[in-house]
Each structure stands twice: as C-alpha cells, then as structure tokens.
Amino acid sequence: MTPNPPLGVVFHWLGGFASGSFYVPYRGVKRWPWEIYWLIGGVFSWIVAPWVFAFVKVPHLLDILHGASPETLKWCVIFGLLWGLGGLTYGLTMRYLGLGLGTAIALSLCAFFGTIVPPIFKGTFFTEVLPTQHGQIVMLGLLICLAGICVIGFAGHSKNNDLPEDKRRETLKEFDLKKGIAVAIFCGIMSSCFAYGLAAGDPITATVVKSGVDPLFGGLATLCVVLLGGATTNILWCGYLIIKNKSLAQMAAPVPAGEKKPSAGLNFLLCVVAGVTWYLQFFFYQMGESQMGKYGFSSWTLHMASIIVFSSLWGFALKEWKGAKTKTLALVMGGLTLLILSTVVIGYGNWLGG
C-alpha cells in the first residue's frame, strides 16, 4: 500500500477527537466513586471494544496471536502494564487540573518520549531521520508541537493566577495545582510506553497484513495485546481502591434528602460510551500510522497534538477557562495554533519522505 500522509493526518485527528472527548461522558456520572466508573468504562476500553473490532476485521486473529513469538508478546504486555500506570493517573490528572491544563502537561512529556525513543531504540534516528531533509522537517514539527504544548501549559498556570480559589473550584471542584502537576508528570512519562508497546508489536502487525488484511487495520491485533497489559494495571488498582474506600457501600448509601437519586442505568451507559470512545482513539491511530510511511514514529506527535487541541476546546465548552483574563485566553489560542501548525509540518515532512 502506498503511504498517504494527508489521509494519515486526518485519521490521527479523528483519534485525537475521540481521546479529547472521552472523559466528557464521565462528567455526567452521578454519585459513583471514581474507581467504579473508571473500571466500568475501562473494561470496554481495554477489553471489550479492542477484541470486538479485531475479531471483525482480522480473520484468524487467535491463530495469528498464537503464532507470535513469546518475546514479542512479552514486551507488548510489559509496555502495556507501564502505560496502564499512566492511563489510570490520566483520570486523576483530569480530576485535579481539568481537561485543558491536565491534558497539556501530561501529553507534553508523552509526546516527546513517545516520538523520540522508538527510532532511537531501532537505531534509525541518527541514520535515517536527522540526516535527511524530510526527517528534519518532521523533527521541526515535533519542536513546534512541544512549543504549543508549553504555551498551553503556561496558559493554565496563568489561569491559576487569574482566578481566586473559590472561583477555580466552581468550575473544577477538586482543583489542586501541586498535586495535579505531580500526577500529570508521572502520567505523561508512563503513557509514552504505549508507543513502545505498539513498536514492539510490529511483527504481529506485519503478520496480519501478510495474511491479507487491509493495512489500515493491521495494528488491531497488536492493540489487543498491549491493552491487556494496561487493563491488568488498571483493574488491580481500581480493585484496590474499591476495597480500601468501600466504594460499593458508597454506591448503596441512601441519597440525602432533597437530592435526586441517580439512574444506575444512565451512569452505566455513560461509562460504556466513555470507554468505547476512548478505544476509538487507537482504532484511528493505527489507521493513521499505516499511512505515514517510514516516518510513522511521528504519528505519536500528531496524536498528542490533536488530543490537546480537542481537549482544550472541550475545556472552553465546559467553562473551565471561565473568568480567565484576555492574556490567558490569547495564550491558549496561540498554543492551539502552534499545535495545528505542527500537524501540517509533520504531515508535509512525511509526504516528502514518501
């Protein structure tokens, strides 16, 4: 299949929209502890949706996975486990910092490490990326992306200074800048391991494509394996919290007088929608990566940039920036402009590289 970087960019933006939007349904869940709704949505994110999509698009899926080398499967799962640590703390980042600021800080580190490390590990970064014009253009796009992320992060800091404590908590009840930044940094570094897991699963993806599957869906089998690792981390942690916090008892507790009892069915449906939406980011991600040619490593930057753009727009829609000064809002728009520019530059560099 001939690479088509512009189409790849479109797929990455679709994935970014899914990732930037998935947490919105969780905000509608009423009176359920975080660990409960994160676990329910996660089961659909990490297990149900990946295997359903893979079984539909990849004939003989189980045979292909059974034929993969134990070494390949091992590293896919290990990196998935490490990514799982970032995945579960991503939810905490949203709680403490909100969609706009939390996503910007966490994904800045995730974008950098997830993009740079795979080609360095493969030994192609200094031989096929930096010495070539198209490789240099791709790296320029990465630098523009990081600059945009930093600008949005600075805007978040500026917002923190714009608003008094009581106003900050009107839009985000659990806002905690220090705790949020610490969690976001850990989340960003661990989350980059997902890119390593996908790279480790390249032999599986190659086998899927050789079996006659459309290359657009070649990465679906690898996603199943990597996400199993992430599911393990998240399920263990949520289970621990459920026991520690007696979360099931909290759900069964009587509703205070005058407060409407939440609908368990609606809560569950919102969790399912959030979980499947989250998975769609990687469904479109692997489609986009298949179109980026030999500079597929830049897909991670495109993915991160598009997530930040859409999550920041959701931040505006949910009034997380309400009360911020004009200077702060100008910083946000400037950062978003840089991120959009970065996707154009990276797409152009990939197109030049063929």
Image (cartoon, rainbow, N blue to C red):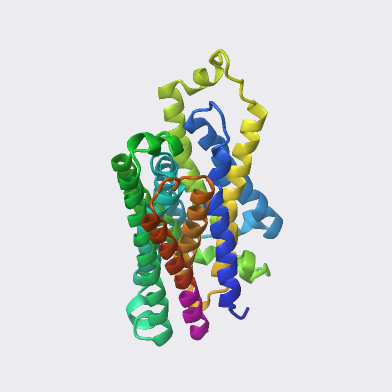
Q: Looking at this view, is 273 or 177 the one in front?
A: 177
**Quadrant location of residue 269?**
top right
Residue 290 visible at all: no
Decide if residue 201 is on the left or right side of residue 180. Answer: right
**Quadrant location of residue 254?**
top right
Residue at 46% across / 55% down in the picture?
A: 76
Decide if residue 167 is on the left or right side of residue 225. Answer: left
Quadrant that contains the N terminus: bottom right
Is 241 located above or below residue 69 in the figure? above
Is 23 located above or below residue 299 in the figure? above
Q: Looking at this view, is 6 or 154 the one in front?
A: 154
**Quadrant location of residue 178?**
top left
Q: Position of residue 215 (x, y in %)?
A: 63, 70
Q: Position of residue 271 (x, y in %)?
A: 59, 38
Q: Main secondary structure of the magenta part?
A: helix
Query: Is residue 346 on the magenta stretch?
Result: yes
Q: Position of residue 157 (x, y in %)?
A: 32, 50
Is 39 located above or below residue 149 in the figure? above
Q: Which segment is the magenta one? A: 344-353
Query: Is residue 45 on the magenta stretch?
Result: no
